[in-house]
Image (cartoon, helix red, strand yellow):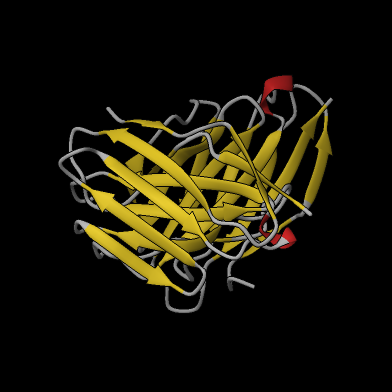
Amino acid sequence: GQNIDQPTEMTATEGAIVQINCTYQTSGFNGLFWYQQHAGEAPTFLSYNVLDGLEEKGRFSSFLSRSKGYSYLLLKELQMKDSASYLCAVRASGSARQLTFGSGTQLTVLP
Amino acid sequence: DSGVTQTPKHLITATGQRVTLRCSPRSGDLSVYWYQQSLDQGLQFLIQYYNGEERAKGNILERFSAQQFPDLHSELNLSSLELGDSALYFCASSPGLGQGETQYFGPGTRLLVL
């Protein structure tokens, strides 16, 4: 089975940097995804890591350590529109490609 | 806009009823995934289809069923509805079964069972 943990809520100030952590335990690992979801809307893809290290994409970066079962999403230069839920999802190994999602971290950006 | 479409956007029905949710994947995508998102459960994988065939099953109830048609659109059928089935139902699609493929989500169908 799979178990994914991430903080329930975080608060940060506009213009600041925030790091959202995710730890996971899986019977097999085939990649980790981060999605952003605004309330009542569809999750939108942010990043994908399958190898150890940092992936940078504009204001967003994601890090993975497979040996530690750990990832983080780093958001820089926070904007009010970044207030959303951030979902960590793990893809299991095997022929299927479904994702197991964490419960999400609700980020509130304050002015 | 992800390119994945879902209908209807909202659905209100009564307990014991049956509903069908529809999903059209992005052009060219062969894999379709269905997820349920309720307030207390988060985003839960239900079922996956690839090119018309069932590929993986998650926490899908026996009252629920799905299929993928030759034109690759998919339908999720929910029957004998209960109050607890009220949730957002998302469909996602990806090109195939490749390791690094991203799933792109549709706007969802909000189901309210009264």
Q: Number of marks in the image?
A: 0
Q: Quadrant of residue A50?
A: bottom left
Closer to the camera in the image, A10 or B23: A10
Residue at 33%, 66% in the rendered image: A55
| Nearer to us in this view, A83 or B3 | A83
Q: Position of residue A15 (x, y in %)?
A: 65, 62
From this view, report whether residue A15 is shown above or below residue B44: below
- Which of A28/A76 is in front? A76
Q: Quadrant of the N terminus of chain A?
A: top left
On-image quarter of the C terminus of chain A: bottom right
Image position, residue B46 (x, y; %): 46, 38
Q: Position of residue B76 (x, y in %)?
A: 57, 45
B68 w.r.t. A24: above or below: below
User: With respect to residue A109, does A75 lie above or below?
Assistant: below
Above/below status of A62 relative to A100: below
Q: Is residue A107 left or right of residue A6?
A: right
Which residue shows up at 57% across the image and 27% down it? B41
Residue at 39% from the left image edge and 64% from the top image edge:
B102
Q: Quadrant of residue B16?
A: top right
Give the left or right position of residue A9, taking residue B15 as reference: left
Residue A7 in picture, x, y percent from top left: 51, 32
Instruction: Specify whether A103 is left or right of A16.
Output: left
Q: Nearer the viewer, residue B53 or B9?
A: B9
